[in-house]
């Protein structure tokens, strides 16, 4: 009888609890994800669990003939790989090994830095923000996701949402500029674009908010160094984009390199666990930055790799990116009782959860497609060109030098004019320089039959060689106007690419001075990964515009703007200082004890071009602000409106930035804070109403040093350009 009961219970167990060896519950796509996770977790050994928490790399190898080595090198149980391939072949081979040779057949998650596009490269993120068009950024990220996923990448290490206020830091190119709100808006847009509605679709990838947190505050703009961030500033300036990104459903975050006032981002229990997991309830996982666990040693908080593993893991970093700390030490730390088993289980659950959500257990392999089927789809290029067009900022346009539609001969000069490679920008993933259109080629096409476009190099990006100056002067002398294309190389921004000054190298400035002597109008076109110091170039330029690093479209959008086919509408997402010596300089600085004093003796104290500056070929006139109520109670809402008229002679697109000001509060507030923006087409002669619906709890409140929100009674100002209106919150 006993035997029969045992047998029956075994059968029941097999049937109902999914413990049937050949068809375990976790492999059943119809079961809820959480059940599948628990089922799988219960089967895993300590070693298998630990291996899920490691990420190695898988080399750039698209050659079917020599794939064996990389495949052999990868352990079948590895949790994740950084995948450098541009097609899925190698990925699928390694995945096959994981599925068939590991005991439980757990798929690998393949990650990669898809920062501003995969093959179709968009303008750098700093530029994208200047377009003030979150919908378009969402679409661009959607295209990046589609190209990446169809090439074997499941997970992008993007968006980079580090508020950054020091242009010397090379990584300002990768983020959305100096303002927390702007970064937050584009975080949400990019997460939506990458992940879509269903991360398991073959066109979406998991997003990764990075670098959590405060990396943008690296001292003196030097990479990997210390950052001094008070808790108040942490919450005021750096946390908002992450909070919003988590709310938007970002699957993962990356812990940062920087030491946050003594506790590195990758060993920070407060940010990683107390806030992210406990308060914000993030249920995905945190991956370390490359080596950021191991680097707890040189940062002086761990004596060896084992201690580094312990600190990072306990703090809340679930996956080890290329540190070799977890695979070597985590198991032992658990056995020794230093890492509680439930913490290990929680970490594994998080990694598995993202894998399940990506559909990797059910469709571990990437469908084989041709490049034509996945890259440069007509819609993808259209989005890239539109985004590049909208991100161009017209900084100066004296005497209506632009648009350039009367000149018969245009001299295009400078190191940016003929480059393809440098227009791609840093972190250009699988971007192909061959597909980039140079400025010269774009202008030749744009002015075909209308004007002659000539070219001279003038000088290199840096160095002292002036041998090409003469030729440039001759070319310029024979033209009606000079389009002077100066700027930065691709690798002058990005990781580990800090510069002591944000001025262009002297040789480029000298070329400008020489050309100006010819008396022709000089249109300065800039391409860079950061704001530049232009105080010597500005007076000798009749017009200035920046196209940043525009990506694959290269010079095409610029050509349309120069010719006037497109009216520029970009506005700066980051201040252009007058001089490098002003850094840090940003629009939302805290109030000073003596607002009218404390200036520099030798230079102006104001920036050359402030945040949100950007001109158009038409003119816009701002009317008076109108508010639905001047006094409201805490729980009530109100609306502010402003009419904007297009008083020029052509249609134009105008972005209105809405700032608030809280003149007196318990904790001193920044001089003004962006809370909303709106972009509209305003036709010639037309007036459009821009509207900001204020929810005081959301828009007028502020945080304390622990992220707690307060809404205080009293006066607030609403600001648009030089217009201001006062409202009052009462109890
Ligand atoms: C280090 C960089 O800081 C990070 O942004 C990037 O995602 C990883 N390397 C992986 O390449």
Image: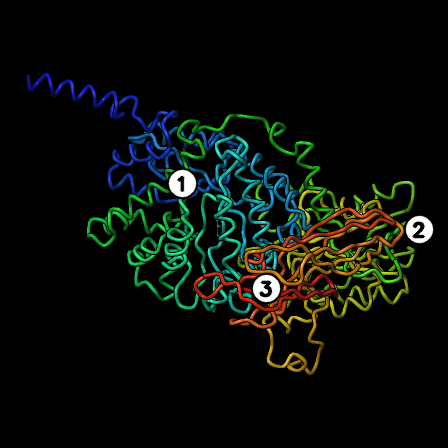
Q: Which residue is mark 1?
A: 80
| 128 with respect to 477 (left or right) | left
- Judging by the rendered image, the residue that carries numbered circle 3 is 729
Marks 3/1: CA distance?
A: 51 Å
Q: Nearer the viewer, residue 437 or 220?
A: 220
> Quarter of the image holding residue 725?
bottom right
Mark-to-mark CA distance, 3 and 2: 55 Å
Whether the residues at callouts 2 and 1 have beta carbons within 8 Å, the answer is: no
Quarter of the image for the N terminus: give it: top left
Up the image or down, 441 lies above or below 6; here it is below
Dot 3 or dot 1, earlier in sequence: 1
Q: Secondary structure at mark 1?
A: strand
Residue at position x 66%, y 43% in the image: 136
Residue mark closest to the camera, 3 vs 1:
3
Image coordinates for residue 267, horizontal then vertical, percent: 37, 59
Q: Residues within 10 Å of mark 2 (few under 14, many from 20)?
A: few
Q: Point out the tag, 2 or 1, that comes first from the N-terminus.
A: 1
Q: Is residue 492 visible?
A: no
Residue that sits furthest to the left in the current view: 1
Residue, disc 2: 406
């Amino acid at each position: 009888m006993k035997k029969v009961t045992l047998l029956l219970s075994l059968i029941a167990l097999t049937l109902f609890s999914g413990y049937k060896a050949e068809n375990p519950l976790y492999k059943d796509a119809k079961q809820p994800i959480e059940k599948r996770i628990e089922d799988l977790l219960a089967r895993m050994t300590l070693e298998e669990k630990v291996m899920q928490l490691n990420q190695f790399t898988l080399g750039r190898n698209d050659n079917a003939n020599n794939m064996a080595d990389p495949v052999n090198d990868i352990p079948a149980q590895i949790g994740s790989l950084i995948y450098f391939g541009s097609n899925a072949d190698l990925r699928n081979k390694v995945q096959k090994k994981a599925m068939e040779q590991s005991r439980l057949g757990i798929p690998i998650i393949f990650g990669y830095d898809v920062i501003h596009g995969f093959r179709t490269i968009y303008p750098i993120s700093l530029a994208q923000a200047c377009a003030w068009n979150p919908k378009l950024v969402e679409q661009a990220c959607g295209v990046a996701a589609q190209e990446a996923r169809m090439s074997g990448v499941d997970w992008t290490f993007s968006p980079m949402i580090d508020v950054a206020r020091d242009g010397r830091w090379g990584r300002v190119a990768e983020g959305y500029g100096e303002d927390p709100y702007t970064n937050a808006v584009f975080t949400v847009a990019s997460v939506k674009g990458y992940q879509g509605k269903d991360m398991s679709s073959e066109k979406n990838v998991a997003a990764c908010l990075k670098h959590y947190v405060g990396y943008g505050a690296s001292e003196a703009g030097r990479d990997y160094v210390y950052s001094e961030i008070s808790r108040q500033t942490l919450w005021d300036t750096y946390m908002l984009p992450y909070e919003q990104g988590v709310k938007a459903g970002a699957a993962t975050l990356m812990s940062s390199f920087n030491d946050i006032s003594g506790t590195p981002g990758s060993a920070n229990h407060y940010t990683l666990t107390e806030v992210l997991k406990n308060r914000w309830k993030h249920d995905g996982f945190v991956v370390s930055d490359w080596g950021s666990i191991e680097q707890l040693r040189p940062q002086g908080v761990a004596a060896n790799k084992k201690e580094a593993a312990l600190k990072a893991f306990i703090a809340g970093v679930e996956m080890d990116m290329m540190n070799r700390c977890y695979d070597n030490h985590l198991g032992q730390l658990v056995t020794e009782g230093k890492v509680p088993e439930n913490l290990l289980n929680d970490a594994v659950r998080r990694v598995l959860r993202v894998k399940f959500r990506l559909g990797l257990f059910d469709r571990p392999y990437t469908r084989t497609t041709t490049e034509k089927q996945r890259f440069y789809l007509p819609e993808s290029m259209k989005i890239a060109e539109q985004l590049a067009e909208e991100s161009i900022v017209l900084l100066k346009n004296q005497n209506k030098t632009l648009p350039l539609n009367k000149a018969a001969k245009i001299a295009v000069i400078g190191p940016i004019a003929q480059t393809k490679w440098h227009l791609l920008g840093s972190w250009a993933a699988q971007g192909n320089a061959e597909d980039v259109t140079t400025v010269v080629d774009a202008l030749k096409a744009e002015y075909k039959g209308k004007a002659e476009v000539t070219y001279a190099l003038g000088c290199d990006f840096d160095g002292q060689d002036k041998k090409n100056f003469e030729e440039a002067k001759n070319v310029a002398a024979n033209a009606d106007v000079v389009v002077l294309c100066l700027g930065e190389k691709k690798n002058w921004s990005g990781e580990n690419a800090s510069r002591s000054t944000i001025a262009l190298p002297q040789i480029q400035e000298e070329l400008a001075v020489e050309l100006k002597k010819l008396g022709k109008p000089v249109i300065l076109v800039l391409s860079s990964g950061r704001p530049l110091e232009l105080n010597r170039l500005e007076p000798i330029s009749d017009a200035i515009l920046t196209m940043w690093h525009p990506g694959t479209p290269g010079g095409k959008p610029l050509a349309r703007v120069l010719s006037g086919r497109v009216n520029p509408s970009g506005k700066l997402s980051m201040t252009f200082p007058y001089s490098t010596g002003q850094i840090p300089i940003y629009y939302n600085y805290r109030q000073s004890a003596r607002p009218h004093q404390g200036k520099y003796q030798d230079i102006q104290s104001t920036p050359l071009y402030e945040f949100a500056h950007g001109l158009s070929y038409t003119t816009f006139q701002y009317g008076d602000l109108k508010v639905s109520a001047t006094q409201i109670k805490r729980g009530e809402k109100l609306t502010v409106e402003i009419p904007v008229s297009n008083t020029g002679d052509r249609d134009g697109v105008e972005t209105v930035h809405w700032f608030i000001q809280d003149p007196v509060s318990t904790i001193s507030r920044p001089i003004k804070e962006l809370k909303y923006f709106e972009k509209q087409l305003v036709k010639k002669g037309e007036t459009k109403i821009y509207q900001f619906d204020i929810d005081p709890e959301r828009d007028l409140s502020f945080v304390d040093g622990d992220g707690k929100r307060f809404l205080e009674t009293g006066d607030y100002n609403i600001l648009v350009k030089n217009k201001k209106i006062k409202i009052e919150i009462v109890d």
